[in-house]
Amino acid sequence: MRRADSRPRSAASRGGLSRRSMLAGLCACGASPSQATSGSGPLIAAAASWRPALEEIVRLYEAAGGQRVRVSFGATGNLVRQIEAGAPFEVFLAADEASVDRIEAAGFTEGPGRVLARGEIVLAVAKASPLALDNDLAGLRAAVKAGGIRRLVIANPDLAPYGRAAREALQKVGLWDPLQARLALAENIAQAAQFVGSGAADAGFIAKSSAVSAELRDVLRWTPVRDDWYQPINQRMAVLKSASAGGRAFAAFLGRPGARAVLERSGFKVP
């Protein structure tokens, strides 16, 4: 499977998308792999699924007197590559555990880190969509059979754990192969959610944390996907060896009750 660029791409031909210009325009204002503001303060690398919750947590931390924090959001796989290339991150918030294992084995982290939350994938559509939603995906199967799905978006499974989970669920119900010509790959899970919310995709598998966010909760309908259809999406944090005192303080704050409450409100399961 070819790596996604800034547009969602067909998993079959990678060309001739009927809404190419719309998608490209949306990408210009969408979530990008690097959105950290300039200036001083610890730099945090965070998977896109963390964004709604983490932005609120950062506000809480700074309001409580913590040092200003900068965050770079992106697909977990891309952030790993940036860390390996020497990016000056101090804390890594991944959407999986394997990515933290990888950079720990390479000597970048102070130990294995810890799981802060577990994510969930949901099947989402715009509120006006006629697609029937159910966690067994029977409505989606019927729509695919009837030709009612022109474009379904997921995050790129080569880069994003949520994309891998979506692929596993589609394979479980026998829809991965039938959907190849209609499957679009977003660069990360936040971008996938934007395409569903904008109507650029008829449906999509996105993070529950995106579906319940203030930005999208009033424009989407969604249903959880059975969690036994995909590997657990354990979102692990690791402190990098280059972390400053400010970075370590923020990492500690992420485990405190206030931050945990934000994660729970934001659609995560908190161990």
Image: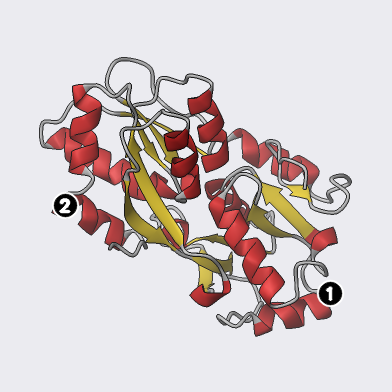
Q: Quadrant of the C terminus?
A: bottom left
Q: Contact, CB < 8 Å: mark 2 with mark 1?
A: no
* In-front residue for pair 48/127: 48
Please, what is the three-letter code of the amino acid marked with disc 2?
Gly
Residue positioned 71% across, 36% down in the render: 5
Rendered location of residue 26, percent (x, y): 64, 41
Label 1: which secondary element? loop
Q: Secondary structure at mark 2?
A: helix
Query: Residue 227 in the image: x percent, y percent?
Result: 50, 73
- The label nearer to you, 2 versus 1, is 2
Kindly report the distance in space between the C-alpha atoms of the residues bearing marks 2 and 1: 46 Å
In-image side of 143 versus 49 (left or right): right
* Residue 130 visible in the current orientation: yes
* Residue that lies at the very extreme toward the left in this rendered image: 65
Give above or below for 37 relative to 112: above
Q: Determine the residue located farthest toward the top in the rendered image.
A: 39
For marks 2 and 1, the one nearer the N-term is: 1
Q: Position of residue 122 (x, y in %)?
A: 53, 68
Q: Amino acid at mark 1?
A: Gly
Mark 1 nearby-residue class (10 Å; few <14, some 14–19, many ≥20)? few
- Label 2 environment density (alpha carbons within 10 Å; few <14, some 14–19, many ≥20): few
Residue 147: which disc? 1
On the question of residue 68 being in view, the answer is: no
Count of picture labels = 2
In depth, the one of 53 and 81 nearer the eye is 81
| Residue at x 60%, y 52% (from the top left corner) | 192
- Report the residue at 63% width, 79% height from top: 137
Residue identifier under label 2: 258
